[in-house]
């Protein structure tokens, strides 16, 4: 039996585990790069095409000391000498390679979604589901290209009309993104790119969402790019009306996510004082961990001296019967997650923070956590213009962007009951979540981009000063 025939039969026993582990270790989507790989193996295989021969493989990567992660590969067969670094293994003079970004393989996935195919493997099945009519798919694509800048997933664009996002790292359960997109589609919410389809694995070793297909916005610029371009051209003030519109779009998103009290996965729930206290305790622990490892750096000197003030301030967060409602939120909101196309905003990447477990990303939370993420992004854009382009934003640019965003946001949600009735309580909670985000940013920047660490450090100091003046 040839390698292609074995692949088509779901038999990957010929793959060398050391080669498989080495391949995964070199991928940008491999989340365990800071840890040593102990081994790798194929948990399940589902053949999805005979011509070309393709199979979806669910691969387990074992890590020291005793943990593991699971990933999706789409495997194909070719003659040796293909794209360097994409070969997963070799057998009988043939290469098995990761074909997810191969146009032929991508076209086969697209056709399977269009046809809503159900493909059986030796144990589990892969179900491809179309959420749209034939017009959404159009003719078979003639131009297929991968999106190269991603880190945690792999995306392919078809004729600049559709985009397929394949999740690489897998966890059991329905993916937060497809869950939210289906909810929004059922309610005709139009500020996300339209859901066209998805595919998932069911059966051993796990039920899991594998990928999602949406409308692609070919002419779109994301909010970060727009802000940086306007600041570079000395037209920063023209961003503020756009920030107002972005705030309104996020407000409509939150209002829609809070609109169904009958669906247990989405029904708003009251935020209790006990729940908020647990969140504060978690933030306090993060503060201790981050400040214990702050480097001796002049730009961090002031924030380092204010650790106790920060921890004390956390305890002054309001308590009471009305702290707003928990809902499903975006979970990783910043300027890069807003795309502007044809004069309007679209919100993308609704999967939450990819590094967090799916069970955590599906939890309900205060919508103000999303708001805080966007407000922090304005500060980054302001300072980023100086770091990346050597230009200074107009005085107070981020503060004005903040005001414009909130002016667009609040009217869209004020009738939903998801925010506290008291604007004072709302502002105090927003301050808490901005502090939480800034502490997270400080830890990240110290570890990965020290030249950016001053941005969250200055935010923490400013929030503490604002509290002291209140």
Image (cartoon, rainbow, N blue to C red):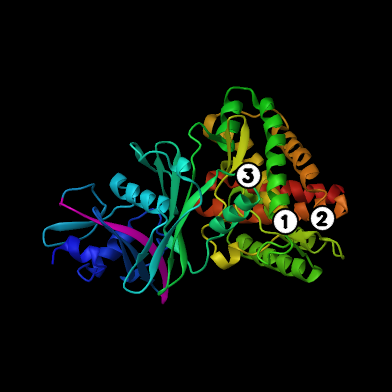
Can residue 146 be seen by looking at this rendering? yes
Mark 3 / mark 1, whichever is N-terminal: 1
Q: Give the dominant element type of the magenta stretch: helix, strand or loop.
A: strand
Tell me what residue is drawn at x 49 percent, y 69 percent. Answer: 172
In-image side of 367 versus 330 (left or right): right
Residue carrying label 3 = 455
Q: Quadrant of residue 35?
A: bottom left
Q: Residue furthest bottom?
A: 66
Residue 439, position in %: x, y? Answer: 65, 55
Q: Quadrant of residue 403?
A: top right
Residue 16, position in %: x, y? Answer: 22, 68
Q: CA distance from mark 1 to mark 2?
A: 9 Å
What secondary structure is found at the residue carrying circle 2? loop
> Can you say whether 242 is above or below 81 in the image?
above
Residue 22: mark in rendering: none
Residue 379, position in %: x, y? Answer: 66, 40
Tell me what residue is drawn at x 43 percent, y 44 percent. Answer: 149
In the foreground, 282 or 130: 130
In-image side of 245 versus 123 (left or right): right
Number of callouts in the render?
Answer: 3
What secondary structure is found at the residue carrying circle 3? helix
Highlighted magenta segment, given as a residue range: 65-80
Residue 417: mark in rendering: 2
Residues at circles 1 and 2 in contact by the CB criterion of under 8 Å: yes
Residue 258: mark in rendering: 1
Q: CA distance from mark 2 to mark 3?
A: 33 Å
């Amino acid at each position: 039996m040839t390698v292609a025939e074995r692949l088509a039969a779901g038999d990957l026993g010929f793959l060398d585990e050391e080669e498989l582990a080495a391949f995964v270790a070199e991928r940008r989507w491999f989340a365990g790069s800071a840890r040593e790989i102990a081994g790798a193996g194929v948990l399940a295989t589902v053949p999805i095409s005979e011509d070309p021969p393709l199979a979806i493989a669910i691969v387990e990567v074992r890590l020291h000391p005793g943990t593991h992660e699971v990933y999706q590969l789409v495997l194909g067969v070719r003659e040796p000498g293909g794209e360097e670094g994409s070969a997963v293994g070799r057998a009988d003079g043939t290469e098995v390679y990761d074909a997810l970004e191969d146009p032929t393989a991508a076209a086969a996935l697209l056709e399977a979604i269009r046809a809503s195919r159900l493909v059986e493997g030796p144990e589990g099945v892969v179900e491809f589901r179309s959420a749209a009519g034939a017009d959404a798919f159009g003719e078979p694509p003639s131009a297929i290209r991968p999106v190269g800048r991603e880190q945690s997933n792999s995306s392919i664009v078809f004729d600049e009309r559709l985009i397929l996002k394949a999740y690489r790292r897998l966890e059991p359960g329905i993916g937060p993104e497809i869950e939210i997109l289906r909810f929004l589609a059922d309610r005709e919410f139009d500020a996300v790119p339209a859901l066209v389809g998805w595919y998932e694995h069911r059966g051993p070793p796990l039920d899991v969402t594998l990928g999602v297909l949406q409308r692609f916005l070919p002419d779109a610029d994301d909010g970060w790019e727009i802000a940086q371009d306007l600041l570079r051209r000395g037209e920063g003030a023209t961003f503020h009306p756009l920030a107002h519109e972005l705030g309104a779009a996020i407000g409509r998103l939150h209002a829609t996510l809070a609109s169904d009290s009958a669906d247990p996965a989405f029904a708003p729930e009251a935020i209790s004082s006990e729940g908020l206290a647990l969140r504060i305790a978690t933030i306090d622990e993060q503060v201790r961990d981050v400040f214990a490892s702050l480097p001796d750096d002049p730009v961090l000197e002031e924030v380092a001296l204010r650790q106790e003030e920060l921890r004390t301030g956390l305890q002054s967060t309001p308590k009471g019967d009305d702290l707003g409602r928990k809902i499903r939120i975006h979970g990783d909101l910043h300027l890069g997650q807003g795309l502007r196309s044809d004069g309007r905003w679209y919100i993308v990447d609704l999967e939450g923070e990819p590094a967090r477990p799916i069970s955590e990303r599906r939890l309900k939370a205060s919508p103000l956590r999303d708001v805080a993420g966007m407000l922090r992004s304005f500060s980054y854009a302001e300072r980023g213009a100086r770091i990346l382009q050597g230009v200074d934003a107009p005085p107070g640019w981020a503060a004005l962007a903040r005001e414009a965003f909130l002016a667009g946001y609040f009217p869209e949600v004020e009738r939903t009951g998801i925010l506290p009735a008291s604007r004072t309580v709302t502002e105090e909670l927003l301050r808490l979540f901005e502090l939480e985000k800034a502490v997270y940013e400080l830890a990240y920047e110290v570890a990965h981009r020290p030249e950016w660490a001053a941005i969250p450090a200055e935010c923490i100091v400013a929030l503490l000063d604002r509290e002291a003046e209140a």
